[in-house]
């Protein structure tokens, strides 16, 4: 068992809810491997209390904090010191503390690119992408793909206003990039013609969640990435795999965004292999 003392440096992830998170699994594995006197915890924090809780954590000596849904946009709106990564993404998933200051960062885009390249090989530049879901994570993914040289982006979301806002943002940062919005049966056809499908809604976080796309949306030769990471395979990934697509869950993105956050907090390189093994053991039952 890990030995704790009055010198142990705490880190944490905050969300609402937070019970699904595997961040403590991977970060504690890396901290133990590196011999750090530190511990990484998880706390459920209501959005209305986020900023006051962050200030308290800073005052209590926390080494750093990760944020997950629905806190990323709230932190972006209220923190006054934002790293360029957070300004580009319009969301904060990592907070670092420096004396009296709290600085917001975003490592989601970096984590996504590393994970997709790891799963499929260099796969974004000049590819036609379909992004399902334009909330915090989907928005970060879409903006990242625009910056990585995608050939085109098609967005789909039940919240059309949100979808339009993200499309407008993409047009501002990449005015030459073709961006379109689709719904219903048009979404199925757009997904089928895409090179890469990215599922970035919360659907799939429950084991019995159905696929948001029908079998006709997938085909052989496609690459399908689902940001959901707590199960080996979501219903969407199973259907896509059965239709001949290459598939990957969000475990790689969790790993690489977390590794980047660790370096921001500590200035050290994490033990990514220890992190990966801990995550794979938690999800797949093996290291």
Image (cartoon, rainbow, N blue to C red):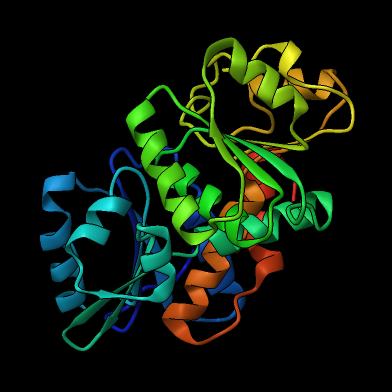
* Vertical relation: 128 (above or below) 67: above
Residue 221 x %, y %: 89, 32
| One can see residue 265 in this view | yes
Residue 232 point in image, percent of width and height = 68, 33
Q: In x, y percent, where is residue 265?
A: 42, 79
Query: Residue 95: x percent and y percent?
Result: 33, 69
- Viewer-side residue, 27 vs 80: 80
Q: Can residue 276 be seen in this view?
A: no
- The residue depicted at 69 percent of the width and 52 percent of the height is 150
Q: How many marks?
A: 0
Eyeballing the image, is 146 above or below 81?
A: above
In the rendered view, does 80 fall on the left or right side of 169?
left
Q: Is residue 81 left or right of residue 280?
A: left
Say which quarter of the image contains residue 13. bottom left
| Quadrant position of residue 192 | top right
Residue at (74%, 33%) from the top-left corner?
194
Q: Is residue 168 left or right of residue 245?
A: left
Q: Which of 182 and 53 is in front in this view?
A: 182
Looking at this view, is 273 or 188 the one in front? Answer: 188
Q: Which residue is drawn at 65% across and 73% down?
A: 271
Which residue extends farthest front? Answer: 176
Q: Find residue 285 and report its image quarter.
A: top right
């Amino acid at each position: 068992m890990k030995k704790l003392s009055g010198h142990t440096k705490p880190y944490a992830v905050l969300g609402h809810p937070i019970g699904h998170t595997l961040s403590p699994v991977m970060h504690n594995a890396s901290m133990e491997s590196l011999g750090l006197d530190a511990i990484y915890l998880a706390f459920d924090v209501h959005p209305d209390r986020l900023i006051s809780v962050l200030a308290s954590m800073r005052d209590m000596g926390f080494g750093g904090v990760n944020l997950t849904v629905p806190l990323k946009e709230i932190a972006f709106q209220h923190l006054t010191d934002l790293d360029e990564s957070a300004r580009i993404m319009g969301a904060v998933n990592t907070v670092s503390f420096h004396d009296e200051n709290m600085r917001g960062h975003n490592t989601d885009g970096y984590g996504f690119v590393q994970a997709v390249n790891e799963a499929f090989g260099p796969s974004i530049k000049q590819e036609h992408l379909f992004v399902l879901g334009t909330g915090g994570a989907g928005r970060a993914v879409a903006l990242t793909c625009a910056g990585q040289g995608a050939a085109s982006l098609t967005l789909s979301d039940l919240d059309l206003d949100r979808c339009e806002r993200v499309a407008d943002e993409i047009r501002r940062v990449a005015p030459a990039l073709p961006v379109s919005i689709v719904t219903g049966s048009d979404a199925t056809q757009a997904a089928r013609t895409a090179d890469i499908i990215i599922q970035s809604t919360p659907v799939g976080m429950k084991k019995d969640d159905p696929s948001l796309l029908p079998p006709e949306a997938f085909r052989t030769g496609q690459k399908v990435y689902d940001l959901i990471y707590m199960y080996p395979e979501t219903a969407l990934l199973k259907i896509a795999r059965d239709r001949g697509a290459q598939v990957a869950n969000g475990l790689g993105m969790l790993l690489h965004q977390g590794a980047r956050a660790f370096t921001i907090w500590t200035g050290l390189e994490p033990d990514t292999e220890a992190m990966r093994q801990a995550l794979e053991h938690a999800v797949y039952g093996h290291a």
